[in-house]
Image: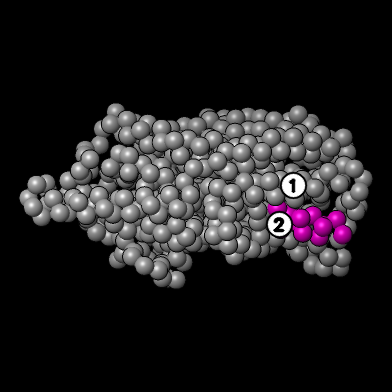
């Protein structure tokens, strides 16, 4: 039975979504800044950095389903999820600072980077998996679940954009820009504080609603039993179709985010003032950050209408195709000699205008895919008579982390293959190097976008099927209650 029957309050939507800011801080750091920090600032080889991050993600991805299973099995008077949200944020904050300010101020080495990155990601999972697993518990409504994810995505992007703006205008605003090592320490401290405030604040705001004993006491945890349940959940047909599309989408996202600073600085020269005669701090990079946030605000109003008109599967496919077409158009026009001179206001504002809608459709695709998981929960419950929100959302995280790590790894290979020199400055890189970087990136992005659209567009659970399934499950619960009233079974027993 869902925690909320009927419409969701505005307060609940905001408070629940607020918890996703921690994810936005982490995702911004890993996707946009970590590779360039360890490569260009600390001097590590880009291929080694991307390989270390990939290995860390793979290790963490194996742990994620266990965290999800443990979250599903947590049995306290505060429910299944809240204990995780109160215990994990502080150690996460400590590990986050170490990532950006390693002991001695020098690169920690290949295995040291792996260890710190694994610690950050596991602790972030211990916050995000229980938090996002609350969505199908809070409401069973097809559209209200999308609404909760809209607020989660908006808050996550807000956390990331705040960090990006502060990075460009406060922490790394000196003459060395993103190569200013001491600025990353302030970046780390502020991000750590925002993570703790986000997760703990969201948990406190939902405490009264979700803090109660779970309906059933789960069986004792065992590693073998956990993996048996995880394997059973991941073999759900609808989850496998979702996973195929999400894998391609997340690889594309990881690659696009991690290569963005390279493209923004070396191709589009966004580190220059946005307006002639304007303040030095009002650069194209700040405009880039503001454009990203505005695109997510647009998504907030568009995605619900798209889901009501076309459903989640078709909306995801439309988002994938529209995003790649709009996103790559400026690059192809630039290579074809049809784009305004780079560094001019016409070039910068033209690029940001295309980015506005490209990213809006990209987020529509991602929020549509993430919202699909909530419907998989009831499909699994119908088949197995067991709910496994934590398992499925940790499965999503397993896919996302492996794929994002692969995307960052691909970026490292693209940068190395294009032979971008260490310590390069905007305007000083040979045009052939930039052309190679653009072409390698574009080819990979097109293939991944097509794969994502193909599989996500074939997600089999429609609104009508979901609503029919809810009726079936409600009737099943009513039968259990009737049987308990007659003394045939215990009220907490699940009847096959």
Residue 182 location in percent, x, y? 64, 51
Question: Is the residue marked by circle 1 packed among few (<14), some (14-19), or many (20+) residues within 10 Å?
Answer: some
At x 24%, y 59%, the residue is: 212
Q: Does residue 169 lie above or below 385 as drawn?
A: below
Q: Between residues 264 and 145, which one lies in front from this camera angle?
A: 145
Q: Is residue 458 left or right of residue 7?
A: right
Q: Is residue 258 magenta?
A: no
Taking the view exactly as shown, the residue that stands out farthest to the bottom is 10
Question: Is the residue marked by circle 2 packed among few (<14), some (14-19), or many (20+) residues within 10 Å?
Answer: many
> Start and end of the magenta stretch?
346-358
Q: Is residue 223 left or right of residue 278?
A: left
Q: Residue 209, which numbered label?
A: none
Q: Is residue 104 visible?
A: no
Residue 209 location in percent, x, y? 31, 64
At x 90%, y 53%, the residue is: 340
Q: Between residues 380 and 275, which one lies in front from this camera angle?
A: 380
Taking the view exactly as shown, the residue that stands out farthest to the left is 487
Residue 284 sits in quarter:
bottom right
Q: Between residues 185 and 4, which one lies in front from this camera angle?
A: 4
Residue 230 sits in quarter:
top left
Residue that badge 2 annotates: 357
Q: Is residue 192 left or right of residue 255?
A: left
Q: Does residue 494 lie above or below 297 as drawn?
A: above
Residue that badge 1 annotates: 325
Q: Is residue 320 visible?
A: yes
Residue 393 location in percent, x, y? 43, 45
Q: Please name the colour scheme applied to the rendered image.
A: one colour
- Magenta stretch prevailing secondary structure: helix
**Cα distance in 3D space between marks 1 and 2:** 10 Å
């Amino acid at each position: 039975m869902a925690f909320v029957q009927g419409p969701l309050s505005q307060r609940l939507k905001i408070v629940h979504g607020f918890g996703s800011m921690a994810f936005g801080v982490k995702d911004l750091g890993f996707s946009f800044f970590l590779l360039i920090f360890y490569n260009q600032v600390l001097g590590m080889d880009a291929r080694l950095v991307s390989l270390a991050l990939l290995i860390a993600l793979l290790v963490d991805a194996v742990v994620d389903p266990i965290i999800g299973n443990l979250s599903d099995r947590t049995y306290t008077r505060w429910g299944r999820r809240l204990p995780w949200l109160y215990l994990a944020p502080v150690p996460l904050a400590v590990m986050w600072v170490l990532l950006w300010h390693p002991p001695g101020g020098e690169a920690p080495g290949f295995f040291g980077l792996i260890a710190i990155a694994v610690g950050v990601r596991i602790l972030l999972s211990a916050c995000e998996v229980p938090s996002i697993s609350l969505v199908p518990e809070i409401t069973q409504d097809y559209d209200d679940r999308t609404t909760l994810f809209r607020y989660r995505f908006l808050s996550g992007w807000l956390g990331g954009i705040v960090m990006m703006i502060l990075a460009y205008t406060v922490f790394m605003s000196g003459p060395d820009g993103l190569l200013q090592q001491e600025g990353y320490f302030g970046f780390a401290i502020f991000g750590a504080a925002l993570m703790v405030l986000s997760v703990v604040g969201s948990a406190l705001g939902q405490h009264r609603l979700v803090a109660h004993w779970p309906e059933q006491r789960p069986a004792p945890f065992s590693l073998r039993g956990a993996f048996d349940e995880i394997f059973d959940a991941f073999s759900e047909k609808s989850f496998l179709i979702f996973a195929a599309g999400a894998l391609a989408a997340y690889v594309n996202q990881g690659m696009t985010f991690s290569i963005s600073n390279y493209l923004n600085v070396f191709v589009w020269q966004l580190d220059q003032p946005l307006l002639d005669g304007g303040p030095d701090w009002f650069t194209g990079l700040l405009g880039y950050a503001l454009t990203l946030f505005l695109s997510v605000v647009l998504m907030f109003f568009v995605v619900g209408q798209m889901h009501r008109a076309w459903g989640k599967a078709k909306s995801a496919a439309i988002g994938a195709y529209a995003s790649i077409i709009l996103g790559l158009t400026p690059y192809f026009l630039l290579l074809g000699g049809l784009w305004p001179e780079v560094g001019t206001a016409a070039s910068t504002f033209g690029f940001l205008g295309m980015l506005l809608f490209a990213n809006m459709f990209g987020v529509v695709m991602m929020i549509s895919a993430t919202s699909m998981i909530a419907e998989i929960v009831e499909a699994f419950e119908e088949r197995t008579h067991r709910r496994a929100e934590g398992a499925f959302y940790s499965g999503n995280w397993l896919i996302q982390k492996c794929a994002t790590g692969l995307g960052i790894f691909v970026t490292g290979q693209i940068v190395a293959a294009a032979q971008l020199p260490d310590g390069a400055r905007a305007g000083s890189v040979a045009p052939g190097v930039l052309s190679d970087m653009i072409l390698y990136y574009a080819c990979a992005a097109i293939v991944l976008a097509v794969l994502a659209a193909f599989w996500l567009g074939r997600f089999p659970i429609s609104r009508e099927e979901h609503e029919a399934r809810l009726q079936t499950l409600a009737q099943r619960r009513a039968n259990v209650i009737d049987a308990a009233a007659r003394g045939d079974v215990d009220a907490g027993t699940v009847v096959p």
